[in-house]
Image (cartoon, grey):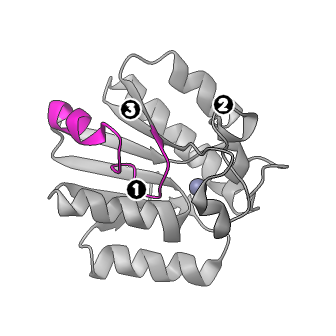
């Protein structure tokens, strides 16, 4: 795998993907092993991985829309256990803490991607219709080729998942693949 590829792992945090998380949804279970497998493959090839994390203040305005979640420095904001273990020891991992759906808003992700300069960014994580969708849009705004692994993304709502996959493919021009 060439260094012209980067993996973006979106918000695989306890509050979304671990039982008792604030916004946990069951469908997240099915993507955890697939995301882990993508990450391990990237590590084998020493290719760059960007881990995004929702990272909110206690009184974030987003909590007018969603219940409180991913409060900075809490358990809920950490990557799920087995992913955290794999990610932390990896030199080519970049952690982006974000206040909004976009991982580009008031973060240094633009600079990081300029340095890494991938041709293709592969995307996995949660949730398909929110942070995955909006970050694929951001990546496409910057003319990266984007591949989304359909079996490595999930949503709390099947219809919204299907809608987002369709938008990602037909409107944003990303490729939808299955990770195997
Ligand atoms: Zn949030």
Q: Quadrant of residue 115?
A: top left
User: Residue 35: which disc?
Assistant: none
User: Which residue does the numbered mark 3 point to in the structure image?
Assistant: 42
Query: Which residue is at the front of the view, 74 or 58?
Result: 58
Seen in the image, is 13 located left or right of residue 99? right
User: Which residue does the numbered mark 1 point to in the structure image?
Assistant: 102
Query: Which residue is at the front of the view, 32 or 73?
Result: 73
Residue 14 visible, this orientation: yes
Query: CA separation, marks 1 and 2?
Result: 20 Å
Residue 42, x across and y down, in percent:
38, 32
User: Which residue does the numbered mark 2 point to in the structure image?
Assistant: 73
Residue extent of the magenta highlight: 97-116
Seen in the image, is 135 located left or right of residue 141? right
Q: Name the residue: 72% across, 34% down.
A: 74
Q: Name the residue: 40% across, 56% down.
A: 102
Above or below residue 170? Residue 127 is above
Placement of the N terminus among the 4 image quadrants:
top left
Residue 12, x across and y down, in percent:
59, 45
Query: CA separation, marks 3 and 1?
Result: 23 Å
């Amino acid at each position: 795998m060439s260094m012209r590829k980067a993996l973006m792992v979106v918000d695989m945090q306890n509050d979304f993907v671990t039982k008792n998380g604030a916004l946990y949804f069951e469908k997240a279970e099915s993507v955890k092993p697939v995301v882990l497998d993508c990450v391990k493959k990237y590590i084998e090839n020493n290719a760059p991985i960007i881990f995004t994390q929702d990272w909110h203040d206690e009184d974030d305005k987003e909590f007018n829309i969603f219940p409180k979640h991913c409060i900075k420095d809490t358990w809920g904001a950490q990557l799920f256990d087995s992913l955290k273990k794999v990610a932390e020891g990896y030199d080519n991992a970049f952690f982006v803490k974000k206040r909004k759906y976009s991982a580009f808003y008031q973060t240094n992700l633009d600079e990081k991607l300029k340095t890494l300069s991938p041709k293709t960014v592969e995307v996995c994580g949660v949730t398909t219709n929110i942070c995955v969708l909006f970050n694929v849009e951001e990546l496409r705004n910057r003319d990266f080729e984007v591949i989304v692994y359909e079996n490595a993304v999930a949503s709390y709502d099947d219809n919204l998942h299907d809608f987002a996959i369709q938008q990602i493919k037909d409107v944003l021009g990303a490729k939808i693949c299955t990770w195997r």
